[in-house]
Image: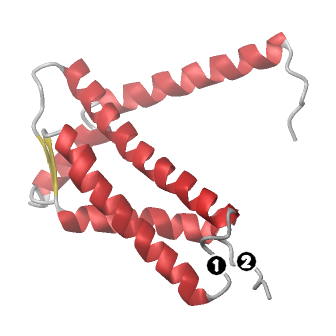
Amino acid sequence: MFNKKKDLPTVAGFVILAAFILVVVATAASLPVFGFYGLMNIFEKFQLNNLLYVSYFDSNIFNVLYILLALSAGYSVLMILEVIFIVLKQRNIIRLSLLYHKLLSFVLLVCCGFLLTRVVVLGLFQRIHCSNSLLLVAFFLIYSFFFLCSDTYRKQEAIL
C-alpha cells in the first residue's frame, strides 16, 4: 500500500502530518467544550461526578499536560499487557484454540489492566479520581474492541 522507499518528501510529509494531528488534538483537548473539560461539564450536568473527577491546576497548560501524561500512562499499561500477551502466545504458553481459552485470556487482561491502572497510574496521578466501575467498563470496552478486531486475539487452530 505504501511506498517502501523512504525518500525525503515522504518522510517530511509524514512528519508534517503527525505535527498537524498533534496540534489539532492539543487544541481540541484544551478547549472547554472538548476534551476533559467538556467531559467534566457533562458529568456535572448529569450529576455523575462520582465516576470521574479531576482536581485541576491553576494553569491550563499544566492541566492539559497532566491529563495527557495520565492518558499516556494508561495507554502504556495497555501496550505492556499487549506485548506480554503476544510473547506468551508466540511461545505457546497461551493458546486460543477453544472459546473458554479466549474468554479466560479476556478476563485476565481486563483484570490485570484494571489493577495496574488503579494501583500504578492512579497512584502516580493523584489529582485524577476514577471510580472502579468506570475503570472496569473502560477496560471491558477496550479489550472487547481488541478481541473483536485484532488478529492477535483470533482463535488459533488446535495443535494435536
Residue 23 located left or right of residue 115: right
Q: Are marks 2 and 1 in contact (CB under 8 Å)?
A: yes
Residue closer to the observer: 122 or 95: 95
The local secondary structure at tag 2 comes to loop
Task: Give the alpha-carbon distance from disc 2 to disc 1, as whole Å.
Answer: 5 Å
Q: Write down the residue under mark 2.
A: 156
Which three-letter amino acid code belongs to the residue tagged 1? Leu
Q: Where residue 106 sits in the image (x, y, percent)?
A: 48, 74
Mark 2 Cα shell of 10 Å, populated few (<14), some (14-19), many (≥20): few
Tell me how many marks there are: 2
| Residue visible at 48% across and 80% down in the picture | 104
Residue closer to the observer: 130 or 28: 130
| Residue visible at 41% across and 49% down in the picture | 77
Q: Write down the residue under mark 1.
A: 96
The local secondary structure at tag 1 comes to loop
**Precedes in sequence: disc 2 or disc 1:** 1
| Residue visible at 9% across and 37% down in the picture | 55
**Is residue 140 among the parts visible in the rendering?**
no
Q: Where residue 140 sits in the image (x, y, percent)?
A: 39, 69
Residue closer to the observer: 136 or 55: 136
Residue closer to the observer: 24 or 114: 114
Q: Where residue 85 sits in the image (x, y, percent)?
A: 56, 61
Mark 1 Cα shell of 10 Å, populated few (<14), some (14-19), many (≥20): many
| Label of residue 121 in the image | none
Q: Where residue 68 sits in the image (x, y, percent)?
A: 34, 33
